[in-house]
């Protein structure tokens, strides 16, 4: 009998736990970075919507290889014990005046990552609208905080204005494209917008 979509998804979850990551989302970042080479040792990275911490931990272990800095911000604390020495953890709203000021102090950044998603309701219209607003906030944050030549990754739900946001990114970055990793669940309507080389 053929494996179901969720069986395939479970294999990513099991692999993540075996390798010490709190969530399967780590393999999305691995695919994105393999395709686009966003991050290198010595970089300074901002991870927005970082909890539970898989992208932060993968960036520390595999991309920076312990050489660089990561600022991880989320409304919830990271589920990493211990938090890697390269990481500055901020628990709070990345878009609030107070946290934004702290991010400016710690920046600017070579790459801004965001796997953030809104609280979902099950109503696709509501959820895509919330995702669009969140993605726009991350885009504006990156506009403020990225170095020239820097890179951006934003998650957005398809149907949530991704075409319009991609158009804006193409004005601000040397290259911009949409990407759906194989590690995304087959029935997920998330995609990632990738901006390379901030102008």
Image (cartoon, rainbow, N blue to C red):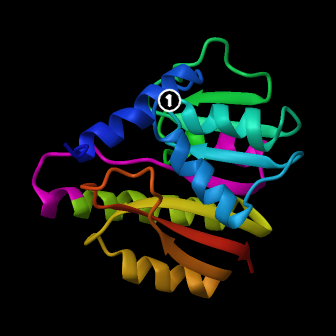
The magenta stretch spans residue 108: yes
The crowding category of the residue bearing disc 1, from other C-alpha atoms within 10 Å (few below 14, some 14 to 19, many at least 20), is: some
Whether residue 185 is situated above or below residue 106 in the rendered picture:
below
Residue receiving disc 1 = 15
Q: Along the horizontal axis of the image, is 16 left or right of 144? A: left
Residue 190 picture location, percent across and down: 34, 59
Residue 160 picture location, percent across and down: 28, 69
Residue furthest to the top in view is 81
Q: Along the horizontal axis of the image, is 9 left or right of 23? A: left
Does any portion of residue 173 appear in the rendered image? no
Q: Quick one: 42 or 104, which is closer to the camera?
A: 42
The magenta stretch spans residue 23: no
Residue furthest to the front in view is 1
Q: Along the horizontal axis of the image, is 150 left or right of 113? A: right
Q: What residue sits 74% from the left and 61% below the top? A: 37
Q: Secondary structure at mark 1?
A: helix
Residue furthest to the left in view is 123
Q: What residue sits 75% from the left and 32% below the top? A: 61
Which residues make up the magenta segment?
Answer: 101-127
């Amino acid at each position: 009998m053929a494996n179901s979509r969720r069986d395939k998804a479970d294999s990513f979850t099991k692999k993540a736990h075996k390798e010490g990551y709190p969530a399967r989302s780590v393999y999305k970042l691995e695919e994105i970075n393999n395709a686009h080479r966003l991050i290198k040792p010595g970089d300074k990275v901002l991870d927005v919507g970082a909890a539970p911490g898989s992208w932060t931990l993968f960036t520390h272990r595999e991309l920076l290889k312990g050489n660089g800095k990561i600022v991880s911000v989320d409304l919830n604390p990271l589920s990493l014990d211990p938090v890697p020495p390269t990481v500055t953890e901020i628990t709070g709203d990345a878009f609030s005046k107070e946290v934004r000021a702290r991010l400016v102090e710690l920046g600017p950044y070579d790459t801004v990552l965001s796997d953030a998603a809104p609280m979902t309701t099950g109503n696709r219209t509501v959820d895509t609208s919330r995702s669009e607003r969140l993605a726009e906030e991350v885009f504006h944050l990156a506009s403020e905080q990225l170095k020239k030549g820097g890179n951006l990754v934003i998650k957005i739900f398809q149907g949530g204005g991704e075409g319009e946001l991609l158009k804006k990114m193409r004005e601000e970055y040397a290259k911009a494209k949409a990407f759906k990793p194989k590690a995304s669940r087959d029935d997920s309507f998330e995609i990632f917008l990738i901006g390379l080389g901030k102008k």
